[in-house]
Image (cartoon, rainbow, N blue to C red):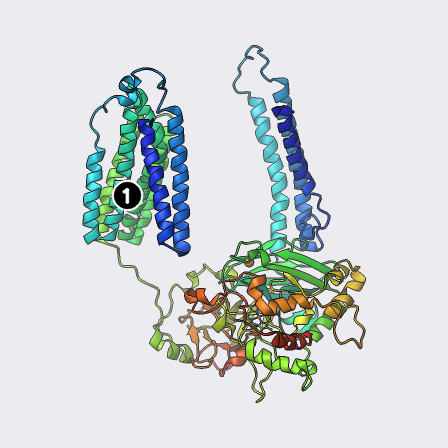
Amino acid sequence: MFTTGSKMFVGATVLSVVAAIVFAAATGGAVGLMSTVGLVTAAVIFTFLAGINLFTRDGNTPSMEQGIEHTAAAAQPPVGRSMWPLIAALGVGGLAVGAVSKPVVFKVSLFVLFAAIVEWMVQSWSERASADIRYNANLRNRMLNGIEFPILGTIGAGGVIYAFSRVMLAANPDAGRWIFIFIGAAIIAGAFLFASGRVSSKRTVAGVCAISAVVLLGVGVASALQGQRTVHPHPTVDDASQKALCLEGGEEEVDERASQDVSLKSNVVANIYLREGGELVAVINGYPDEAHEITVPRNAHIGVIFHNDSDEPERLTGRFGSFPDKPEAVSCTTAVHPGKSAYLGFQIPKTNLASSTPLEFIVPGLDGASIPIVVP
Amino acid sequence: MTFLTRRRLAGSAVAAATVLAGCAKDAPQDTFKPKGSNARTIDDLQRPLFYVAGAVGLIVFAAIGYSILRYKDRGQDMPKQTHGKTWLEVLLTVIPALILVGVGIPTVAAVFELADQKSECVVNVTGQQWWWEYDYSGTCGGVEITEPIVTSGELVIPTNTSVLLRITSRDVIHSYWIPALNGKRDAVPGRLQTLRLEADEPGIYVGQCTEFCGLSHARMRQAAVALNPADFQAWVDNQLEAYADNAPEADTLAAKGESTFIASCSRCHQVNELVKKDGTPVLAEPDLWVVSGAAPNLTNLMTRTAIGGWTFDLLTEDCREQLWNASPEEFGSLYLQGVWMNTDADADKPVCFDEATLRDWLRDAPAMKPNYSDPAKLDSTGGRTRGMPNLHLNETQIDELIAYLLERK
Ligand SMILES: [Cu+2]
């Protein structure tokens, strides 16, 4: 009664129903619920597919015909050999290797195994779908290409991106710039040649692409082995010395790139300027005049930008209060060159009334440069 | 009835329902009814656009309909097939391009106009799961705000004053929107974005958080209340009134309420200038108890008309109707009376006060507003809740608290 193709789906249906029941009974909580929902969904899908298969009887076999069970396409032995068992075996081997070495090997093997099983099943089913080999191959493609193409495409694009990123990480910054320019130019030139019809052979294009891919992968692997170039981090003040430095000032750790920290510039509560005369003023987002006090909501992440308009490197320090059982919270920018600016982010958990020390912005070493912070 | 006629019937029913849905009468969040200059800028842009797009849509549908009916398959011969018609293609490229340029210029102009930050009042607006907090300082429309004012749910602004909101969030992304006054602005943690509001007339303009922000997103509403400058001054004066002026008299129910409040509520909720028996200030520490690190300031609770993310009314239904439908002239004085609207001077309880709602809230807030405050599920947040937990108060305590909170006006 069951047609060949539907057997697989009927089996999968039964399996997922049983799995859903076992899971629902054995695992509670949100995880259990989600998994059960997932398994039930799978069961519904498999039922649907099994139903379609049953309905179409794996093709167009007239079910009332005598002896059709021997002559029908589905009854014919499979043609050719399949590489999928081999790949599946590789996957199983990989699982074992992965179990004792790296988790990533295990995961990749799991994926390979799963893919191989699916491919294998669909292939052997499609090979029996009819006596026409071309038709069978078509059937297989119709079933699987929809999944294969996006996955292979993703893997391919991922490989290219990964390899390219390794190259860029290994190359020094100046070389990187030229590599980018060269590759971009080459792609545009190639595209132009292709579009203008000067190169029309598909094989040439495919060949060039394939060679580029291989070269990219090769260089990528080589770069990955060579490792990343040393990236010089922005100078920062380390925790232990931070507080003293913030409160007493000093020119150590001048941040050469402070003014390049642009990401949050348009979303700050205030721009704080150190004027040439040593006066500290705030231009608060939204207020027309300069302000000498800043009100910020409590317990929200807030940012300010410090602009150093004086002639010396200076830092902006925020004194963010001493709340019960905690030392005073202090934080500062690194020293900023004259004419440059830097971002300082902070969060004050309680009202300033609860602090035993004042809340304010200061420039260490400059008396009188201070802007009180009010936290209602 | 044949299948076809039935299908046609169903089709027209759906179409009619869709069209009629656009005709809701009581729709305070209608984007086509601007009540202030910023919203009008948007409306002046979108209305002509809507008409142009509507006309284009009608023409396209008419053309499609005509072609379908006129040329449907009646067994006639295949018509001659043609390809390409340069003048037509040029025309069909140029006309949309011109329309888009025509639309683009005023759009860009409006975008820049709306992004302008000049204002006569700045209010910090901070979103969290699932309510909005406002804090005022500096001057607002010429009114001096000597101490910061912190309120929730209801944003009070002076009319005909450009008010700049500086919007941020304490937890996840929310979005602030008062459709009658301006477009939306996302509240993003770590960022501070601005939005200007300006209302022509006194009144209440409602809105709703428009970025899905978790369990009680649907109960995260807000309103802007516009008062004329004199009423706004009165509102500010009242907000800044010393606690001593409203402090409960000794041995009253409200005085018991104050102690209960200090014992059970003040760890989260601030009441400004509230002091303990020994005279030390009572300072809330919501950072220790609530995930967002904030709970509404209750100093002037009774000056609001709704609580809990502006979802549950403090006003009874009749009084709310009265307030919402009040003329611009009488709106301000009604609003400033709050729950004491329509109440005789010697009455001991305000007639407009929806006591049942506040009682329910105090008895079991999570039952009204789902908020993950079940103690069994607070491991991941270190015991902190995402809203007001059920505090298991008894009815006596609730009586006392209500008496106390009624005086927070
Ligand atoms: Cu929200």
Q: Which one is nearer the viewer's eye here, A270 or A117?
A: A117
Per the image, the residue denoted by label 1 is A111
Does residue B324 sit above or below A96 in this rendering? Answer: below
Please provide percent x and percent y for residue A94.
20, 45
Residue A359 x, y percent position in the rendering: 51, 78
Badge 1 crowding class, 10 Å Cα cut-off, few under 14, some 14 to 19, many 20 or more, is some
Q: Is residue B393 left or right of residue A179?
A: right
- For the point 26% across and 52% down, the residue is A170
| Residue at (59% x, 28% y) in the render | B92
Secondary-structure class at tag 1: helix
Q: Is residue B362 left or right of residue A264?
A: right
> x and y percent of residue A312 in the render?
43, 73
The image shows a total of numbered marks equal to 1
In this view of the protein, which residue sits in the foreground, B75 or B156?
B75
Query: Depth check: B35 or A96 in front?
Result: A96
Viewport quadrant of the N terminus of chain A: top left
